[in-house]
Image (cartoon, helix red, strand yellow):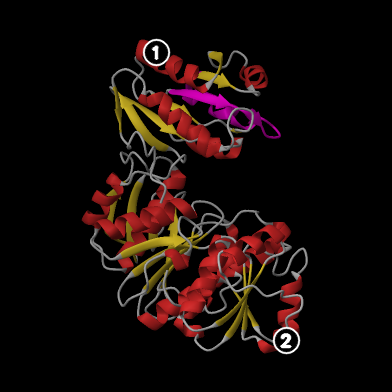
Amino acid sequence: MFPATTFKGKSVAVFGLARSGTATIEALQLGGATVHGWDDSAPAVEKARAAGLPISNLHQLDFATLDALVLSPGVPLTHPEPHWTVLKARHAGIEVIGDTEIFAREADAAGARIVAITGTNGKSTTTALTGHVLSQAGLDVEVGGNIGKAVFLLRQPVKGRVYVLELSSFQIDLMPRLDPEVGILTNITPDHLDRHGSMENYAAVKARMFASQHKGDTALCGVDDDWCAAIAEQVVVTGADVRRVSVVKDLDDGITAHDGVLRDKRAGVVKAEIDLRAMPALKGRHNWQNACMAYGAATALGVDARAMAAAMTSFPGLAHRMQQVARVGAIPFINDSKATNADAAEKALSSFTNIYWIAGGIAKAGGIEPLTPLFGNVARAYLIGQAARDFAATIGSAIPHADCGTLEKAVAAALRDAQEDGKPGAVVLLSPACASFDQYPNFEVRGDAFVKAVSLLPGVEMTIPGDAHAART
């Protein structure tokens, strides 16, 4: 916790008393602001009041006496309709901002550096990987925002310290002065349309990542979807160094990895290459894109390609996201428990061959029917949970499969068969394509159960700590 001095002497309302809200209240108080906290949840209000935080009923407070409203990013700013606090703030003519906006102002005042990352998919892994690469290169780095720690629970900004921040569209919507030294937009696909009203609005919010950048800044923008490709064209006018990123095509000027080899090109000339194909935590095109983005950020901050390659090789991955957790002999075990639907599982099934696939739980609409084109990558399937019978019907005779019921039985059977079959490149993969609620409270608990079951196998060599289970950056 550190003081938010940029609001010294000002009066601020903070709506939303979860982790980031209470941290923001404390930071503002330490910095000399008068703070009024509130929430629509009575238990949250009472908990904050019991903790000694300043509580004011914002229904009764005259917003004309305030300088700003700090809004939780989970509270509607525009759609389906503005929250009542937003309407009061607009009527009073005060700014509506988020904790990340206050933090960015603190960082700017201190001379700290910000790498900001957004996108529909891949932003968490890109954030963690970028932080890992910069840290391994010896930079003073903090990682947080929408991943891990709330921003005011990070170390205090000082000159030269680098903050790698994952930002959701909700957070960007509350950052009118967003101006990162390095801005990253991974991709845009339909998401959160209930909160933004339309794809056009959603894309416009994401594009604000680059809107205030200027000469000396770096803008890394994926160009493998039409929305981002259009945004990349618009960013040129800011004067920032625009680096286009693609993992499906070659670029004469940009960062590409369409064949698994990262190439940094300027005007057709290759400046650096990194082979990503053997890196255990960076399998698949989606992870190649993450690596390209991290490379671009690290390059902008002065890290050389050789140091980056070593750091990417040692990257442990994020918990439950295609993370290699162990080996038995040459057979790796991959925890992809976060794949709670077929679309998410598709990335894992596209990244390996000779897969001993553990799947099942509570199926989403459509089940695993969209995955049938990838069944050729699967050697055998081990079905668990409520969806086992339906998945077996979809698989039919395409793949040898067994109804194992439990995760523990599936892990043991998958190892036995992989060892007996002796197929080259065999991998045991938990990528359930299902929610977990029939057997586990959430996908994290399911993933941890997988890691525990693997850790008990004979001859196992864990590649993550057996008790910590995974990097949870």
Q: Report the front residue among 342 and 93.
A: 93
Q: Report the front residue among 225 and 402.
A: 402
Q: Residue at x 44, y 77 (%)?
A: 3
Q: Quadrant of residue 304?
A: bottom left
Tell me which amino acid carries mark 1: Arg
Circle 1 sits in a helix, a strand or a loop, which is it?
helix
Residue, far top: 420
- Few, some or many C-alpha atoms within 10 Å of disc 2 (few <14, some 14-19, many ≥20)? some
Q: Say which quadrant the N terminus sits in.
A: bottom left
In this rendering, is residue 348 above or below 460?
below
Is 132 colored magenta in this rendering?
no
In this rendering, is residue 15 above or below 62?
above
Q: Report the front residue among 307 and 257.
A: 307
Q: Would residue 437 appear left or right of 27 to someone viewing this image? A: right
Residue 435: percent from the left, percent from the top? 62, 34
User: How many labels sit on residues?
Assistant: 2
Q: Quadrant of residue 334?
A: top left
Q: Report the front residue among 353 and 459.
A: 459
| Residue named by callout 2 | 92
Tell me which amino acid carries mark 2: Ala
Please indicate, yes or no, whether residue 53 appears anywhere in the rendered image: yes
**Nearer-N-terminus badge (1/2):** 2
Residue 180: percent from the left, percent from the top? 44, 73
Is 378 colored magenta in this rendering?
yes
| Residue named by callout 1 | 416
In this rendering, is residue 157 above or below 32?
above
